[in-house]
Image (cartoon, coloured by chain):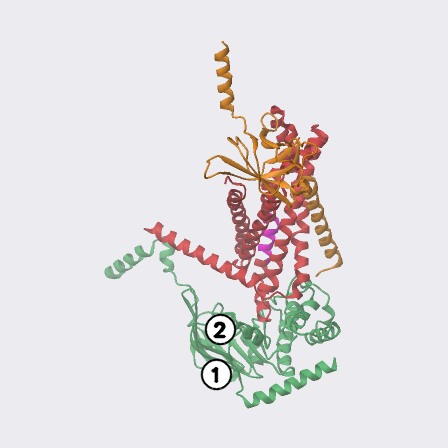
Chain colours: A green, B red, C orange
Amino acid sequence: MTLYLEQQCSQIHHNKEVNSLMSDTLVDIQNMSFSRAERVIYNDISLQVQKGKITAVMGPSGIGKTTLLKIIGGQLSPQSGSVVFAGENIHTVSRKRLYEVRRKMSMLFQSGALFTNISVFDNVAFPLREHTKLSESIIHTVVMLKLEAVGLRGAADLMPSELSGGMARRAALARAIALDPELIMYDEPFAGQDPISMGVLVTLIKQLNRALDLTSIVVTHDVTEVLEIADYAYILAEKSIIGEGTPAQIKASKSELVQQFLQGNADGPVPFHFPAPSLADALLGKSTQDSASNSTAKSEGGR
Amino acid sequence: MNVFVNLGATTLHKLQAIGNASLMLWGALFAVPRLKNIPLTIYQIYVLGVQSLLIIIVSGLFIGMVMALQGYTILVNYGAEGSLGPMVALSLLRELGPVVTALLFAGRAGSALTAEIGLMKATEQLSSLEMMAVDPLRRVIAPRFWAGMISMPMLAIIFSAVGILGGHVVGVDWLGVDAGSYWSIMQATVEWEADVLNGVIKSVVFGLVVLWIALYKGYSAIPTSEGISKATTETVVVSSLTILGLDFVLTALMFGVN
Amino acid sequence: MTSRKTELLVGIFVAITIAATLLLALQVANKGVSGSSETYTVFAKFDNIGGLKARSSVKVGGVVVGRVSRIYLDDKELIPVVQMEISMDYINTFPETSSVSILTAGLLGEQYVGLQPGFIFPGEDPIFLEQDSFVVDTKSALVLEDLIGQFLFSRDSSS
């Protein structure tokens, strides 16, 4: 077991030395455009994720933030532009190489996505059993350590259906760090959590990032929580990046859209009302054509 | 004009779906097989094969018994009740065994597969497998496919055998057909290669079709509750129709007039 | 995921399948005799093969000794030739003088080839039917129309 830890430590130090010679950008997206079935999701966006830092990606619901993570992970391919992870272009490497590169990154899905037919322990052990040839006793120790890091060592033998939402997410987090990846992507980790769970997750993300020398991308719309821990943040809206910077810079941003987002205002550049004909016409049961001719008649005749 | 546009669009859509399904099958089958997945396959044989045993045996028994009953009432008019044995045996081995087993399999195991895989897709388990650098085609789809391919012919053979025994119980023990002639005329008429093996070949082909449809429908299901229920119904309907259509083609090929 | 119970049940499943297969093989299809692959080929020419089909049996006194493998029209003489596969168990058993006829099993049953072994003169070295032999003495199938014609003709002539 000590041998394994030693190997991990030396690996981390080796990586640090090698990477300090390379640039500090772990993920580099340049001019990426992506559309799905005629609908443009991203239009020529560029963003960089710095190594060892927590980068937040925020934006209104439905903007396609999960899609961005899937693009970084290689599950979706952009129509144009490049996505470079640790010096390799994700979408041009061979399938075999892509699978090898994916071992260095992991993703925490919104629902945790634990495998429901096996226990928590087996879930966390899964990547170890798949990708390493470690003996069962070493795997047992590593799994217990990972579960300890997220505070679930006592729940190792439970089935995923027996866990609460927050616990399931923490278990999934333990699985995500099982192979000590370089990058973790969190997809809406705070969604629907009670304040205590939220606090636990926020602390965990920050601690793990520092302790394991990770790089984290947190996709969320929980502004307050993520700005507490993020080193850098991007705000996505309307198919592009409308704001970026450190949390302090973002809070001081002059953009109306950014401010509406930060303050949580109901109305502003993102309208409250879904486009519809005027209320008066809807109540009177007139069609849009009727109301158009009526309003012109009225405006001509004067009220 | 609109009719043709829609027809063209639907045809293209279906062709695309078939292409997608073929890619999925190719990726699942012809990737280098890994010994690690054998325990998974064995577990799937349990899920798909062993748990279908009850319905297969009960159905086979009753169908064999009904065939003997119905067959007897007709054959006795020609004094040919001795031919009850080959009648039951040939009907089961050539047609009812493979076809009914496949239909039951599609309804029970096929729908379960579609629902399970659709649900795994909806809860992002398949995505997380991919992100963990594990190919979901090899890990989830392939074991289920091979387990089903192994189980289907086995179930069909058991169905036919149980049916013939059921026919014996009704014909010989109940209706008084001579036990000796039940078996001996059957033995004289039924041929190993032509009847039994052809029936097995049919069940293998049906198994391939049912599994392919069930796995693909699950894999490509829309990850909502309506999407999954739609995919599950489609599996059962499309599999059943394809089985019956293929049965005609295979029967014409194997037993048709030369 | 694979517990002992699962493996046990899968094993039982396989065992049941093997039992069913054996049942089908031995009891139902009686693979022992009809599946024998060692055969020799014998030909016979007939005027009319009636309802004889490929895979019909060849019987001696009711015992199945082989199967009809092919029926075709001889391209020179334009008469039907029946190709039969006789089991190797009966090699060098039937003399050349044996006769074959097309008989019907039961009143409405299938037609089969009945082989009547020929006479063996004691003291003589008999020549047996072997691979690719032709049986010379053949009796064609009874055609119903001919029978009726004969019957009517004989009635006519007698009245």
In the rendered image, the quadrant that contains the N terminus of chain C is bottom right
With A201 as the anchor, is A63 left or right in this view?
left
Residue drawn at x 52%, y 37% is: C81
When the figure is inspected, residue C125 is found, relative to residue A70, above or below; the finding is above
- The magenta-colored residue range is B106-116
Q: Which label number is shown at residue A252?
A: 1
With A143 as the anchor, is A225 left or right in this view?
left
Q: Position of residue A273 (x, y in %)?
A: 42, 64
What is the crowding at mark 1: few (fewer than 14 residues within 10 Å), some, or many (at least 20)? few
When the figure is inspected, residue C98 is found, relative to residue A15, above or below; the finding is above
Residue at mark 1 shares a chain with residue at mark 2: yes
Residue drawn at x 73%, y 73% is: A135
Q: Amino acid at mark 1?
A: Ala
Q: Place residue B27 in its image quadrant.
A: bottom right
- Residue nearest the observer in this picture, B215 or B223: B215
Subunit bearing disc 2: A
Q: Amino acid at mark 2?
A: Gly
Q: Real-space Cα distance between discs 1 and 2? A: 17 Å
When the figure is inspected, residue A106 is found, relative to residue B50, above or below; the finding is below
For the question of whether residue B124 can be seen, the reply is: no
